[in-house]
């Protein structure tokens, strides 16, 4: 049995990747600091950001378990759960708070808390970055992009029917720490998430205090609302570090299929790099799931591509699209993106021996209906304007284990994808 977590743990925002190596070995969860690594080229100085939790806490219906002292006092004020209708009754919480009123928190302390809470669990998986450097030089530090379907809490506990997943694996009181640990370990400059149903009480307050600007767009008819004791609708969330980027434009897109509005959404933001002044569009989406909906997904993808064509003015603004497409590479929607006039390529193909094949899986689970092993998640990018410098390797079958995902040491049924991108100095007329 797992008891209510009380923690203070070991050092989080130190960069996890101990070098760019090909195959990870199993890691050990430890109370000691991680090995020293080369510092990120970007500054870790966090801008002042203020308590978003104050408003959220007033809306809470129940309190998550205590998280220890020190940082935990801060966290316990944040980690309360909104009632089902909080977001709809208070639309002002769909807008990020004024960053000048927020107080920063130390990411290292937060990582320590994560590791203390999780010390009774198996060790976190060790994954390493694969160096994919090309001959394209860049005079500015790369941008780290993270794509991840984190598994909505209501769906994990109430709808997904994971057959080999112990009940304690899905308890939010500890699973949220595994999610935060994964994010903080890789220190993304931009974070694209799907199935987020704890935006207001967990991710927005905490990531705001770590220097991120956040945007959330819920599904109009989220299946989470069908689950008893849900935490509100799930949706897509996009976060970017405010000390690296300036927001130029933001669009929330409700996807259509055959002229009909659907339940799937996207967020597209045009950002400007503060170091280089270069602009690009970052997009997060989550397409319709289930076998039998292939043409529907294709129509959603075509609608998204048309929206992005307008936002990027053809190919004038470089583009990165992160998403759970719920589609294998053999599906029409994948082929639409691969052949689009936006000149896109899939970053994770570069991990294959020929540079042309997608990974064998990005999600692997066992449901009561059987075992599911699929490649559904992608990071698309403008291949003539951007270069992939490195990509986070995937977990091996041995690491994932016979019970598949989620597990006691991995919080989602989807693997996170992380890439470092640089602008090409001569983007062949794309800029």
Image (tube, rainbow, N blue to C red):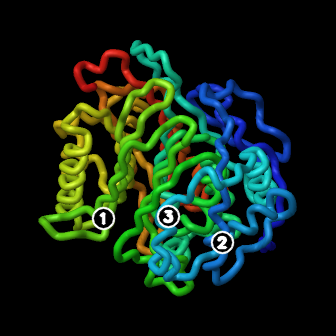
- Residue 288's disc number: 1
Q: In screen coordinates, is 178 left or right of 68?
A: left
Q: In screen coordinates, is 6 left or right of 25?
A: right
Alpha carbon distance from label 2 to label 1:
26 Å
Give the residue drawn at x 22%, y 48%.
305
- Residue 171's disc number: 2
Q: Quadrant of the C terminus?
A: top left
Give the residue drawn at x 61%, y 72%.
56
404 and 193: which one is in front? 193
* Mark 1 secondary-structure assignment: loop
Circle 3 sits on which residue? 196
Q: Residue furthest bottom?
A: 228
Residue 224 appears at what percent x and percent y? 46, 77
Please determine whether, in this image, residue 256 is positioned above or below residue 422.
Answer: below
Displayed quadrant of residue 403: bottom right
Residue depth check, mark 1 versus mark 3: number of the one nearer the observer: 3
Q: Quadrant of the N terminus?
A: bottom right
Q: In screen coordinates, is 7 left or right of 211?
A: right
CB-based contact (under 8 Å), mark 3 and mark 2 = no
Please determine whether, in this image, residue 258 is positioned above or below residue 394.
Answer: below
The answer, for residue 244, to whether it is visible in the render is yes
Alpha carbon distance from label 3 to label 2:
15 Å
């Amino acid at each position: 049995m797992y008891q209510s977590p009380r923690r203070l743990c070991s050092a989080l925002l130190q960069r996890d990747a101990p070098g760019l190596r090909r195959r990870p070995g199993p890691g050990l969860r430890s109370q000691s600091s991680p090995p020293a690594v080369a510092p990120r080229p970007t500054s870790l100085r966090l801008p002042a950001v203020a308590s978003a939790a104050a408003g959220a806490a007033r809306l809470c219906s129940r309190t998550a378990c205590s998280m220890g002292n020190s940082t935990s006092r801060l966290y316990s004020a944040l980690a309360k759960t909104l009632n089902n209708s909080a977001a709809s009754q208070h639309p002002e919480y769909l807008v990020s708070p004024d960053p000048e009123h927020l107080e920063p928190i130390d990411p290292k302390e937060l990582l320590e808390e994560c590791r203390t809470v999780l010390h009774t669990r198996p060790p976190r998986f060790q994954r390493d970055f694969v160096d994919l450097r090309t001959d394209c030089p860049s005079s500015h530090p790369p941008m780290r992009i993270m794509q991840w379907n984190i598994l909505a809490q209501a769906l994990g506990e109430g709808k997904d029917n994971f057959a080999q997943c112990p009940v304690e694996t899905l308890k939010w009181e500890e699973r949220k720490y595994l999610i935060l640990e994964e994010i903080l370990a890789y220190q993304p400059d931009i974070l694209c998430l799907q199935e987020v149903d704890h935006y207001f009480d967990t991710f927005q307050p905490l990531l705001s205090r770590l220097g991120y600007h956040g945007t959330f767009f819920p599904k109009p008819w989220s299946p989470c609302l069908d689950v008893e004791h849900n935490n509100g609708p799930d949706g897509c969330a996009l976060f970017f570090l405010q000390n690296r980027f300036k927001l130029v434009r933001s669009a929330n897109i409700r996807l259509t299929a055959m002229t009909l509005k659907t339940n799937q959404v996207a967020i597209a933001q045009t950002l400007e790099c503060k170091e280089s002044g270069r602009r690009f569009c970052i997009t997060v989406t989550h397409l319709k799931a289930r076998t039998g909906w292939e043409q529907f997904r294709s129509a959603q993808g075509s609608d998204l591509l048309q929206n992005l064509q307008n936002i990027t003015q053809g190919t004038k603004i470089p583009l990165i699209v992160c998403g759970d497409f719920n589609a294998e590479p053999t599906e029409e929607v994948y082929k639409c993106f691969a052949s689009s006039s936006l000149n896109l390529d899939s970053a994770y193909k570069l991990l294959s021996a020929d540079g042309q094949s997608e990974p064998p899986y990005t999600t692997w689970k066992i449901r009561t209906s059987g075992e599911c092993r699929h490649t559904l998640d992608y990071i698309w990018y403008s291949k003539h304007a951007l270069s992939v410098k490195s990509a986070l390797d995937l977990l091996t079958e041995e690491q994932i284990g016979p019970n598949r995902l989620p597990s006691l040491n991995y919080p989602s049924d989807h693997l996170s994808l992380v890439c470092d991108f640089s602008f090409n100095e001569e983007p062949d007329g794309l800029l």
